[in-house]
Amino acid sequence: MRVPPGVVVAVSLGPLAWTGLAASEADPGLDPRTGAPISYVETIEDSEFELLMVPVEGDGTLGGFWISTVEIPWDLYRPFMYPKDEMQGLAIDGVDAVSRPTPPYVPMDFGMGTTGYPAISMTQFAARQFTKWLSVETTRFYRLPTRVEWSYACGSSEGSVKIDDAHVRHYDTADDTYGRVGALEPNARGLHDMLGNVAEWVLDGGEENSVATRLTSTGSSFSRPGEVDPRLVMGGSFEDDLEDITCGAARPSSPVWQRRDPQLPKSIWYLTDGQFVGFRVVRPFSEPDADEREVAWEPDTEGLREIVAKQRAR
C-alpha cells in the first residue's frame, strides 16, 4: 500500500479505524488557492490506468461529490482481484482489512476483453469491497453512489440528456459485447457510459426488505438493503434496447444472475450470468462518519458476515 508523507492510515477488520487523509496532506481534488473542488486523476501502484474524478456540485439539498468519468475498468479491478502479495509473495500493509474475491472458475470477462474495458460480473458486495480497497490504497474515501446521486450525475441540469448512438452503447450497436470505457461521447458533466455499455451498481436495494437511510456526507437518501436481492443497477447496458435506457432506469438484481454458479451457497463475489453489470465510484466532498463507512463497505446480511468471517480466518 502506498502511504505518502504526512498520511496516517489505520485499518482493521471493521470500518471504524479508517482515518483517511491527514489534514496536513494536500488534497488533489481541491484547488490549492481557493479550496474549491476540482478534477483530479486517481492512480494506484499496480496499474497504469489513470482514473479521472470530476466534481459534481450539489443542488442545495444534495451535497457535492466527485465521480469517476468512466466505469471501473479491469485495469483497476484486477489488482484488487489478484493482489501483488498473492502473485509475487509480497506483503502489503493493511490488506487484511479488506476482503478480496476468491479465484474465479472462469475468466470473468467471458472473452469480451480486459485492458481498457469495464470490469463486470461482480456482486454488489464485491464492488463495495473494491471501494474499500481503493480507499485504503489511496487514503481517500470511495464508495458506490446512491441511486439519488447516480441519477443526479446522469441527468445533468447543465443540458438535456442525449440518448443516441453517439452517447449510448445499446443492443443494436453493441454486437453482444461491451465497449471500451470512455469510447463514446460524454454527457454534459463529462461522464462516459452513464447510459448503456454496462449497468452500474448503486448502494440501494429494492423497495422491499430495505430501510430508508440518509448519508451524512451528501445528505443523500437511499434504500439500505436487508437481503442479498434485490439490489439496484442503473442506466441500462449493451443488452438493452435504446428506448429502454434512461437516467431513471433501475433494474433489481435477481438470483437468476447466478444461475450457473455451481457453488452452494452461491458466490458472494461473482455473477456468472451478470455479464452486463459493472460500476463506477464516487467520493463525497465531505468526509464520511463511521456509519457511512459501515454502510459503504461492510457485509450487511448475516449470511455475508458468516462467509466473510470464514474467508478472513483462512
Image: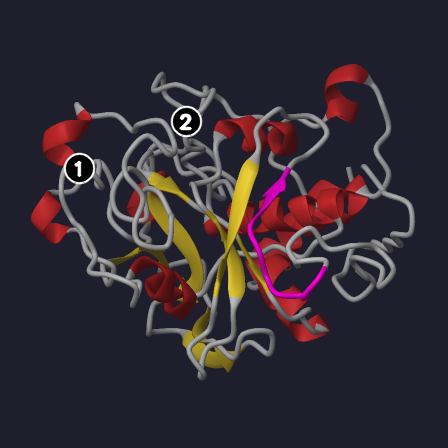
Say which amino acid is labelled 1. Answer: His
The answer to which of 227 and 17 lies nearer the viewer is 17
- Give the SS element for disc 1: loop
The image shows residue 9 at horizontal and vertical percentages of 85, 53
Residue 244 horizontal side relative to residue 250, left or right: left
Residue 117 disc label: 2
Assign the C terminus to one quadrant of the image: top right
Q: Say the numbered circle drawn on residue 241.
A: none
Tell me the residue at 17%/37% (across/down): 170
Q: Is residue 105 above or below residue 12?
A: above
Label 2 secondary element: loop
Identity of the residue drawn at 33% across and 74% down: 207
Image coordinates of residue 97 in percent, x first then y, are 77, 48
Q: Amino acid at mark 2?
A: Tyr
Q: Residue 3 in magenta?
A: no
In the image, residue 146 lies at what x, y percent?
44, 65
Residue 170's tag is 1
The region drawn magenta spans 33-42
User: Nearer the N terminus, badge 2 or badge 1?
Assistant: 2
Marks 2/1: CA distance? 16 Å
- How crowded is the residue under tag 2: few (<14 C-alpha within 10 Å), some, or many (20+)? many
Q: Quadrant of residue 242?
A: top left
Query: Dividing the picture into quarters, in which one does residue 238 lie?
Result: top left
Q: Nearer the viewer, residue 4 or 223?
A: 4
Examine the structure image and report whether residue 37 is included in the region drawn in magenta. Answer: yes
Please say whether residue 283 is visible from this viewpoint.
yes
**Residue at (66%, 51%) from the top-left corner?**
132
From the image, give the main secondary structure of the stretch colored magenta.
loop
